[in-house]
Image: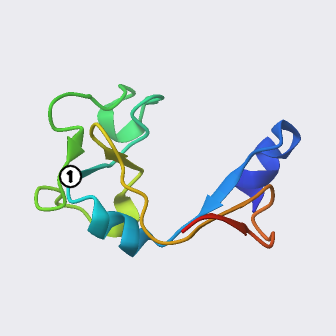
Amino acid sequence: MSHYMTYEAEKPVIFRFSTAEILAANPHVKFCRLNSGDTRSNSYLDGAPPERGPRTFLSAADFDRTPSQVAEVTFEHKCAIAGPIGQDSHPDGRFKVIAV
């Protein structure tokens, strides 16, 4: 909730969906261990930001970390919508279904 409160004044739109259904419909999914758009220096890298390159985004088969270490998910070229998608402006909202 604290992350939401950081952006609450910007009136974000929040989508809720079944991760399992989206991933099943998009086998071309790629996973990333870091925020690829805003890498920051890290003490474990002697103050340098993590490198980005051809192995920044990896398929599930090549991603050698735990699910809790996924920072970003991306779908190359397109993402098929699968299952109901809900929308609200608050994480505790009622999430109106906007697509099935």
Q: Position of residue 78 (x, y in %)?
A: 33, 42
Q: Is residue 48 left or right of residue 18?
A: left
- The amino acid marked with disc number 1 is His
What is the total number of numbered labels drawn onto the structure image?
1
Q: Residue at x 79, y 71 (%)?
A: 92
The residue at the far left in this view is 62
Q: Is residue 26 left or right of residue 3?
A: left
Determine whether the residue tagged by mark 1 lies in a helix, strand or loop.
Answer: loop
Using a 10 Å C-alpha cutoff, classify the residue at mark 1 as few (fewer than 14 neighbours), some (14 to 19) or many (20 or more).
Answer: some
The residue that label 1 is drawn on is: 28
5 vs 35: above or below = below
Quadrant of the drawing holding the N terminus: bottom right
Please say which color scheme the image uses: rainbow
Residue 10: quarter of image: top right
Q: Residue at x 44, y 29 (%)?
A: 37
Quadrant of the drawing holding the C terminus: bottom right
Q: Residue at x 39, y 27 (%)?
A: 47
The residue at the far right in this view is 9
Q: Nearer the viewer, residue 51 or 18?
A: 18
Q: Position of residue 5 (x, y in %)?
A: 81, 51
Q: Residue at x 11, y 61 (%)?
A: 61
Q: Nearer the viewer, residue 68 or 98?
A: 98
Residue 65: quarter of image: bottom left
Q: Position of residue 95 (x, y in %)?
A: 74, 68
